[in-house]
Image (cartoon, rainbow, N blue to C red):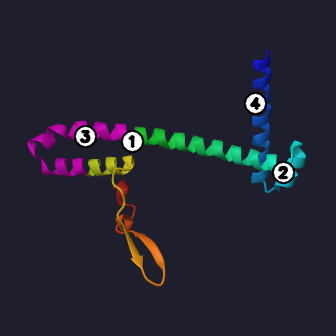
């Protein structure tokens, strides 16, 4: 029975966190959220942060699933091109190279090139994306 009580407590906390998040999105202060949820301000802040963290996890999980689906699509394209690539078909080879580039990008295999420029101001310039104008969808 104790375990059921613990589960019930987790549900109450989850509902409170969702309420806190909803209120914060509507512009309520942490003080107002605390009063509404009958907790202190620190708890209302933690509740909102916990809700945001859960959203981040959902986004990351969704992004990972999308990446996996895209990699599967690239595998299918590679399989369809294989015979023509092996025959030396230039168009098929170029298409395969583009698939390989896309796969490397999705998997984070190509680390951007960075150069440090030192002068009156110090900054890092990402050379790897200077010529990239979002033409990946071609």
Residue at figure coordinates x 41%, y 38% from the top left: 69
First in residue order: circle 3 vs circle 1: 1
Magenta segment's dominant SS is helix
Residue at figure coordinates x 67%, y 47% from the top left: 52
Secondary structure under badge 2?
helix
| Residue 104 location (% of width, % of height) | 32, 49
* Label 4 crowd bin: few (<14), some (14–19), many (20+), radius 10 Å: few
| Residue 11 location (% of width, % of height) | 76, 30
**Image mark for residue 78:** 3
**Image mark for residue 70:** 1
CA gap between label 1 and label 2 equals: 43 Å
The residue under label 2 is 41
Cβ–Cβ under 8 Å for marks 1 and 2:
no
Cβ–Cβ under 8 Å for marks 4 and 1:
no
In which quarter of the view is residue 31 placed? bottom right
Cβ–Cβ under 8 Å for marks 2 and 4:
no
**In the current view of this chain or complex, which residue is farthest to the left?**
87
In which quarter of the view is residue 76 placed? top left
The residue under label 4 is 10
Q: Is residue 134 above or below residue 2?
A: below
| Residue 54 location (% of width, % of height) | 64, 41
Quadrant of the image containing the C terminus:
bottom left
Magenta region: which residues? 69-97
CA gap between label 3 and label 2 equals: 55 Å
CA gap between label 3 and label 4 equals: 47 Å
**In the current view of this chain or complex, which residue is farthest to the top?**
1
């Amino acid at each position: 029975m104790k375990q059921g009580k613990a589960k019930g407590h987790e549900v109450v906390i989850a509902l409170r966190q969702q309420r806190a998040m909803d209120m914060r999105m509507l512009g309520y202060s942490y003080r107002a959220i605390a009063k509404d949820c009958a907790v202190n301000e620190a708890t209302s802040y933690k509740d909102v942060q916990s809700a945001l963290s859960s959203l981040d996890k959902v986004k990351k999980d969704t992004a990972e699933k999308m990446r996996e689906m895209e990699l599967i699509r690239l595998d299918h394209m590679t399989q369809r091109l294989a015979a023509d690539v092996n025959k030396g078909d230039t168009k098929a080879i170029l298409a395969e190279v583009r698939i390989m580039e896309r796969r490397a990008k999705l998997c984070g295999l190509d680390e951007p090139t960075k150069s440090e420029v030192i002068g009156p101001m110090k900054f890092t310039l990402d050379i790897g994306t200077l010529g990239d104008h979002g033409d990946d969808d071609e």
